[in-house]
Image (tube, rainbow, N blue to C red):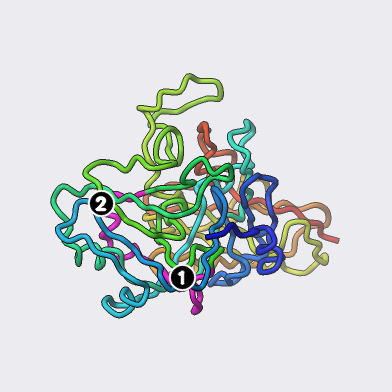
Amino acid sequence: MQRIDDRSLVAAEKPELTVLPTPELNAETPAHLLDEDITPTDRLFVRNTGFMPGFSDAELAAWMLTIDGCVRAPRRFSLDALKRDFETVSQIAVMECAGNGRAFFKEQTSTVLWGHGAAGCPRWTGVRLGDVLRACGVTAEAVYTGHHSPDLYLDDSGPALSRGLPIAKALAPETMLAFGLNGAPLPPIHGGPLRIIAPGYPGAASQKWLTRIELRDREHDGERMAGLHYRMPRVPMQPGDPIDESLFDVITDMPVRSVITSPRDGFTARLGDPLMLRGHAWSGHVPVVSVEVSTDGGTRWRKATLGPLPDRFAWRRVLLTLPAPQPGELEIIMRATDAQGHTQPLGSAPWNPRGYLNNTCHRIRGTIS
């Protein structure tokens, strides 16, 4: 196994993405490039926590997935065996980093300063993780999965990521072992040959380059499961507050969010013409029910049209025609609301030490002349 120059790969395969200035690869998609209902592979963001492993043809041919731990019959599966022995399924589902929107906190929380573009909605193909686990005989002791992959931290100090899922989510029908993306084999930069897809959860739960799933009798304690990684405090916090890790819980649901895809930030429009607005809205496990748009700083709101939901965890199209604006500068704000009444905040979401889940409203500015 060798290291891949992932930045060169992004430059070649995803030239429109913005590469963040971090030691590991983080590349986000400018919002105006997310307009398509199904995000093309070359516009899907990338998040790595260590180096990207490269597999030779021989290593790919010998690749196996091991299932062990709290199962009656530990097994190993080749990719061909997964495709042969289990039903192949596809779903359109949002993938979103838990740190999406982190750049909009006033207090710094992490060096990975995502804007609004650490999200996408492609079509995933694979088999249901629950089908594979049940074939191994999940025992009553199993409460969590632990996922294992060959990627290491950049200094080779150990595994870069080893996340897991509560057993109920692992067995849920939407959770997949994915080997396809947008009708093609899952590319290495997105975790090929095999990755977890856990819709509704933060992207870190959808671990890439998967080689082993261990069923645990306790919450998984692998790399980036402990401490403050992908955890939110149960009580409000302010910068500088003492941190009690026992008051933090693993993130198991992503908040409601929307993005304006057209016009793009910095737009110019002709005076007297109506303004056609497009975008998407999505949430984790709780459906989006409405989207509104304001052009006066949030004093008044117009209700936008929500398109049909193409899949349970997909995003929905947002459309609105704004009346001809007055000449001058114009700011457009979009906010979405879910079925439990949670609405995107005009300002930042509640602060937390790692800067997760900042689903602040998307704002764009332009000129009418």
What x and y, as percent, mark residue 109? Answer: 58, 34
* Residue 229 visible somewhere in the drawing: yes
Name the secondary structure under disc 1: helix
> Which residue is found at the position 61% from the left and 60% from the top?
4
* Residue 310 visible somewhere in the drawing: no
Q: Is residue 142 covered in magenta?
A: no
Instruction: Answer few, some or many: residues within 10 Å of disc 1's Cα (few below 14, many 20 plus, some between 14 and 19).
Output: some
Q: Is residue 237 above or below residue 361?
A: above
In depth, the one of 205 and 54 nearer the eye is: 54
Earlier residue among tags 1 and 2: 1
Left or right: residue 187 compared with residue 128: right
The residue segment tinted magenta is 164-187
Q: Is residue 184 covered in magenta?
A: yes
Left or right: residue 358 compared with residue 249: right
> Which residue is found at the position 32% from the left and 43% from the top?
220
Left or right: residue 287 compared with residue 327: left
Residue position marked by numbered label 2 in the rendering = 215
Name the secondary structure under disc 2: strand
Type of the residue with mark 2:
Leu
In depth, the one of 186 and 360 nearer the eye is: 186
- Say whether marks 1 and 2 touch (CB < 8 Å): no
Image quadrant in which you'd find residue 322: bottom right
What x and y, as percent, mark residue 213? Answer: 32, 56
Residue position marked by numbered label 1 in the rendering = 60
Instruction: Answer few, some or many: residues within 10 Å of disc 2's Cα (few below 14, many 20 plus, some between 14 and 19).
Output: many
> Which residue is found at the position 48% from the left and 26% from the top?
237
Type of the residue with mark 1:
Leu
Q: Which mark is on residue 15?
A: none
Outermost residue, right direction?
Answer: 369
